[in-house]
C-alpha cells in the first residue's frame, strides 16, 4: 500500500479538493483506493457523504488513531491511501508525514501562500519522505504563476499545475469531482489526469492503468470504521 499525504499548514490551498480528485482519478483507473480524512473539520468526509457513487471508500480517523488504522488498511489490500490533513502542522501531522510514501504539498501561487508554504516546510524539515509541490488554483497566464513555479522549483519537484476553475468548486457541492459534472471543462479533466499520472510516476508506476470513466467497483475492505457506501447505505 502506498500512502500519499496531502499537506500544507495553511488552509484554503486546495488540499481537500485535490485529495478528492486524485482519489476518484485512481479509483477510475481500477486501483483500490481509500481516502482518509484526518482533519477535525472533516471537509473531505462531508464531501464524501454527498457522493452518490459507491466506488470510493473513506475512513475518518483522528490523527492520534492513525497507527491503528493504517495497518488494517494495508491488510485489507488497499493499493493507494490518500490522506487529507488539517490546515496546521502539529506533531501528529509530522508523524504521519514520516509514514507516507509521498507528500503532496499543496500551494497557491500568491505571496502569502508561498510564504506559508515555506514556513510549513520549516516545520517538517526532518521528514525525509519524497515531496512534490502542487500549485493549485493558478490563474492562467499570470506572471505570479511563473514566479511561483521558479520559487518552488528551487526547493523541490513541482507537479503539473492545476488552474483556477469554477468547475472544481461546483463539483464539490454534492460529492462529485470536476469530471463528473455535466459539461465539465476538458482541460480541467486533462489537468487532473496529468496530475494523477505524475503522482503515480513519483511512486514508481511508469505505466499507470488507463482511466475507465464508467463506474468502477472495488472490494469492500474488512476494516472497522471504514465507511463504504455499499455497507452504510444499502
Ligand atoms: N483549482 C481550483 N480552482 C478553483 N477553486 C478551487 C480550486 N481548488 C480548490 N478550490 C476552492 O478553494 C477553496 C479551498 O479549497 P479546499 O480544498 O477546501 O482547501 P484546503 O483543504 O487546503 O483548506 C474551496 O472553496 C475550493 O472549492
Ligand atoms: Mg481541507
Image (spheres, helix red, strand yellow):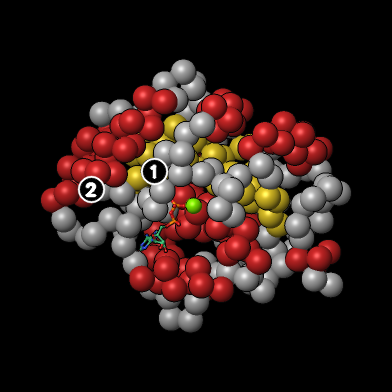
Query: Which of the two discs, 1 and 2, sits closer to the camera?
Result: 1
Q: Residue furthest top?
A: 126
Left or right of residue 79: residue 100: left
Element on which disc 1 rests: loop
What percent of the width, then of the height, locates residue 47?
A: 58, 64
Residue at (40%, 71%) from the top-left corner?
167
Q: CA distance from mark 1 to mark 2?
A: 13 Å
What percent of the width, then of the height, locates residue 88?
A: 46, 39
Element on which disc 2 rests: loop
Q: Which image quadrant for residue 24?
A: bottom right
**Residue 12 visible in image:** yes
| 172 vs 151, nearest the viewer | 172
Q: Which image quadrant for residue 69?
A: top right
Left or right of residue 140: residue 233: right
Residue at (42%, 39%) from the top-left corner?
9
Local crowd size for mark 2, using a 10 Å CA cut-off: few (<14), some (14–19), many (≥20): some
Image marks 1 and 2: residues in contact by CB distance under 8 Å: no
Which residue carries the number 2 mark? 110
Residue at (57%, 47%) from the top-left corner?
39
Of the 4 image quadrants, the one containing the N terminus is top right
Residue at (51%, 72%) from the top-left corner?
173
**Residue 194 visible in image:** no
Which residue carries the number 1 mark? 10
Q: Earlier in the sequence, mark 1 or mark 2?
A: 1
Left or right of residue 144: residue 4: right
> Is the shortest distance between ligand 1 and the CB of mark 1 under 8 Å?
yes
| 118 vs 53, nearest the viewer | 118
Above-or-below relation of 127 to 141: above
Amino acid at each position: 500500500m502506498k500512502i500519499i499525504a496531502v499537506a500544507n499548514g495553511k488552509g484554503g490551498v486546495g488540499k481537500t479538493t485535490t485529495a478528492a480528485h486524485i482519489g476518484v482519478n485512481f479509483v477510475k483507473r481500477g486501483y483500490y483506493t481509500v481516502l482518509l480524512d484526518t482533519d477535525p473539520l472533516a471537509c473531505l468526509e462531508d464531501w464524501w457523504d454527498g457522493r452518490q457513487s459507491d466506488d470510493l471508500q473513506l475512513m475518518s480517523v483522528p490523527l492520534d488513531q492513525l497507527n491503528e488504522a493504517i495497518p488494517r488498511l494495508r491488510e485489507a489490500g488497499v493499493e493507494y491511501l490518500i490522506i487529507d490533513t488539517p490546515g496546521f502542522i502539529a506533531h501528529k501531522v509530522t508523524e504521519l508525514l514520516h509514514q507516507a510514501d509521498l507528500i503532496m504539498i499543496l500551494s497557491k501561487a500568491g505571496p502569502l501562500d508561498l510564504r506559508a508554504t515555506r514556513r510549513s516546510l520549516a516545520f517538517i524539515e526532518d521528514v525525509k519522505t519524497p515531496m512534490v509541490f502542487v500549485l493549485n488554483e493558478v490563474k492562467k497566464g499570470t506572471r505570479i504563476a511563473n514566479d511561483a513555479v521558479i520559487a518552488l522549483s528551487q526547493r523541490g519537484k513541482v507537479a503539473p499545475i492545476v488552474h483556477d476553475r469554477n468547475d472544481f468548486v461546483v463539483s464539490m457541492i454534492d460529492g462529485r469531482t470536476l469530471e463528473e459534472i455535466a459539461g465539465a471543462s476538458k482541460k480541467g479533466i486533462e489537468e487532473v489526469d496529468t496530475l494523477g499520472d505524475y503522482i503515480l510516476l513519483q511512486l514508481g508506476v511508469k505505466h499507470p492503468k488507463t482511466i475507465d470513466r464508467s463506474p468502477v467497483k472495488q472490494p469492500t475492505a474488512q476494516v472497522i470504521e471504514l465507511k463504504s457506501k455499499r455497507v452504510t447505505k444499502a
